[in-house]
Image: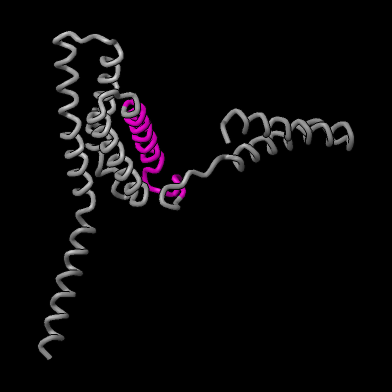
Amino acid sequence: MNETFRMLFSAIAAAFVFLVLFLLLHWHLAVCILICIGVYFGLFMILKPSIKISGIDVEDLPGGEEIQDILNDAQNDLKEIYRAAKAINEPEVRKNAEILYNTGINILSYLKENPDKIKTARRFFNYYLDTAAKLLKRYVDFQDTGLRSEEVMEILGKTADSIPVMNKAFERQFTHLMEGELLDVEADIELLNSTLKMEGEK
């Protein structure tokens, strides 16, 4: 529910209450005004949308609003990458851009499920993701000019070569974020192997 609708709905409800109390029930004007103000702000707060990250209200998370802003910016960057990928004419370059987008989506999904790691992923959000979105947008801009000058072709070529490099950087960031889980799995495997060896010796 957007802000304008909340304000409009709350104002209409408050006005309706005022008309009923003042015109039909003939309550005192000051009392009617105070009640209507209460109705307006009460409804406005009740209708406020609840934004959740990993099932937790943003307001209940430490630094929740900042985290939500980071995720919103990341979502916008990924939309830019998606639009650019679909607009790229060269099949191989488009394929690499789509792989980059999918890696970014997977990282974002992981972070939404693990909001405590979002602040440690600042470099991914502020540099890698933002840079990828800008480069792909510029690639499409240059592509769409139709120019095939040496300078334009050189820029297109360099940008195309940078996309797999960016994807490797994305993957490194993802692996770094998942270090805890990777270590846990490795420990479980070692424990399993040790258990199986011990049981085999009996």
Question: Which residue: 22% across, 37% down?
Answer: 123
Instruction: Count all numbered tags in the image, as a single digit.
Output: 0
Q: Quadrant of the N terminus?
A: top right
Residue 129 is at least partly visible in this image: no
For residue 2, what is the image quadrant? top right
Residue 128 is at least partly visible in this image: yes
Q: Residue furthest bottom?
A: 202
Q: Position of residue 176 (x, y in %)?
A: 19, 48
Q: Residue furthest left?
A: 201
Q: Position of residue 148 (x, y in %)?
A: 20, 10
Question: Which residue: 23% across, 49% down?
Answer: 177
Question: Which residue: 25% across, 25% down?
Answer: 90
73 above or below 190? above
Residue range of the region highlighted in magenta in the rendering: 57-84
72 to the left or right of 143: right
Q: Position of residue 111 (x, y in %)?
A: 32, 47
Q: Position of residue 197 (x, y in %)?
A: 12, 81
145 above or below 92? above
198 above or below 155? below
Residue 73 shown in magenta: yes
14 to the left or right of 124: right
Q: Quadrant of the C terminus?
A: bottom left
Residue 64 shown in magenta: yes
For residue 37, what is the image quadrant? top right
35 to the left or right of 7: right
Question: Which residue: 13% across, 86% down?
Answer: 200
Q: How is the image coloured?
A: one colour
The majority secondary structure of the magenta stretch comes to helix
129 to the left or right of 37: left
